[in-house]
Amino acid sequence: MAGIRALISGAVIALFCARASAASLDQQVEAIVRPAANALADFVFYRVDLFGQGFPLIVLWLAIAALFFTFYLGFINIRGFGLALRHVRGHFHNPAANGEISHFQAVATAISGTVGIGNIGGVAVAIAIGGPGAAFWLFIAGFLAMSTKLVECTLGVKYRRYNPDGSVSGGPMYYLEHYLSSRGLPTWGKLLGGFYALSLVIGCLGIGNMFQSNQAYVQFVTISGGDGSFFADRGWLFGLLLAATVSMVIIGGIRSIARVAAHIVPFMGILYVLCALVIIGMSAEHIPAAISLIVSSAFSADSVTGGMVGAIIVGFQRALFSNEAGLGSASIAHSAVQTDEPASEGLVSLLEPFIDTMVICTLSSLVIVTTAYPNGLMDSGLEGIALTSAAFEHHFSWAPYPLAIAALLFAFSTSIAWSYYGLKGWTYLFGESGFAQLLFKTVFCAFIALGCMIELTAVLDFSDAMVFLIAIPNILGLYLFAPEVKREVNDYMRRVAAGSVHLNDA
């Protein structure tokens, strides 16, 4: 309790200090950070011309990796799917193994970090830009991304470190450092790991924190009365309450975060899936035409929507930005799993892009194409989550409320997951001491509150670019480790088939 009180007190102090100068803080920060944010974004999201369409190089970098690993590992995203489900159901849980959380808790925590506002609003934006065909390529990209996830999460477990208090630390900073250190370059290994960790800390305070709290605040105000809501001009109060709630979860570390994620993720996922299925069902007469439109547009030369290439670009971009395959962030959560078999957790991670992209994003796509398209909502001027909400509201006036609840949960769960990612980047840089961890958690909670008070778009843009910048060294590391991962996975699956792997019969 003392730790929670200290964390909340620190966040309150930081919040009111920030609030005192909030009126001018955003303008000052914008002026300072904007040039750096623009320069970094121009570099990270640099576009090359591809058949007349601008293709962000970072998306191409991630997409090529996903395609390579899918073929190199013999379509492991299909071969290992059934085994992944068995692991999540606990068939191979070994209570004597090293680690802190179960396979199910690990995948729930990682999914909570990827399933967010983009699954609801981002898909609508993708279809508005790339046409209905973007939904087809989004699905394909999600399928390919499953293989990338397997590689980075297998490595995360294999090269994790065990701390004196029994906790574990893992992720790209550790396996990238190991690769160079094991080849006589320890200094370069530490520098590369430090670069990844620092980028992760900066990124977590932006897209994994301030953006999420800001979106949660906007959604809450919307469902509680709009401009007439009690919280309409009290973002600081909502931010403080949200920060206090998050602090009570993250103070307990990965075990507390995993327990909460294991309850929230299934609930919010089922809530959204059921709502989407109901809306799609209410537009059942449009389903055949919608599917036909999606497929035909995916291979169309129609210049209005950018044609096939435009649909591919937008679809892959939305999918890879959503499931984060190739960034390495999810491997940090998976590294905490209780197992002595790295490949087992790699297989479990296959489920993340499947759920995040192939299920949730695809359902969002179908809601848009079966409802928004035939009813003229695409010409209404609405964008993002507002367009998705309008599609839900077309059939039920109250439908935006459960949608808003799902969005709130998405934002909250993303924040708690990214708090752990940022924490592990922080402890890599500054050590595992209790003070270092408490300091980071206090700063993280203060930024949650700040995100509800002011919109620091330059900070968000900068953090967004930093997060995707780390995909460059991470993917390089995955290529270098590819033969080792292939041997690890094939050997594990062979031993499972032979019955020589621990099987939990309980």
Image (cartoon, helix red, strand yellow):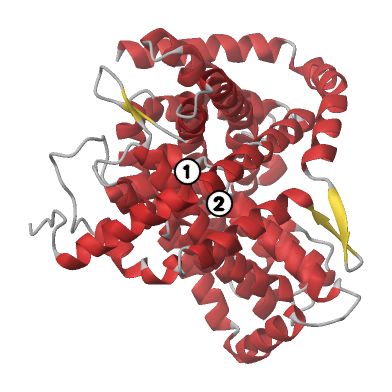
Residue 275 lies, in percent from the top left, at 50, 68
Q: Judge left or right: residue 308 versus residue 442.
A: right
* Element under disc 2: loop
Quadrant into which the N terminus falls: top left
- Residue type indicated by callout 2: Ala
Q: Which is more toward the observer, 499 or 466?
A: 499
Q: Residue 338 at x, y = what percent?
A: 24, 41
Q: Residue at x 51, y 41 (%)?
A: 414
Task: Of the two numbered discs 2 and 1 on the same chain, state the one appearing first in sequence.
Answer: 2
Residue 96 shows in the view: yes
Position of the C terminus, as image quadrant, is: bottom left
Q: Is residue 270 above or below residue 251?
A: below
Residue situated furthest left in the rendering: 506
Q: Residue at x 28, y 62 (%)?
A: 493
Inter-mark Cα distance, 2 to 1:
8 Å
The residue tagged 2 is 325
Of residue 392 and residue 503, the one placed in the foreground of this image is 503
Q: Residue 503's image quarter?
A: bottom left
Q: Going 62% across and 91% down the picture, which residue do you hit? A: 288
Whether tag 2 and tag 1 are in contact, CB under 8 A, the answer is yes
Which numbered disc covers residue 330?
1
User: In what element is the residue under mark 1?
Assistant: helix
Residue 127, image x and y in percent?
Answer: 74, 68
**Which of these two is toward me, 223 or 93?**
93
Name the kind of residue labelled 1 in the image.
Answer: Ala
| 258 to the left or right of 500 | right
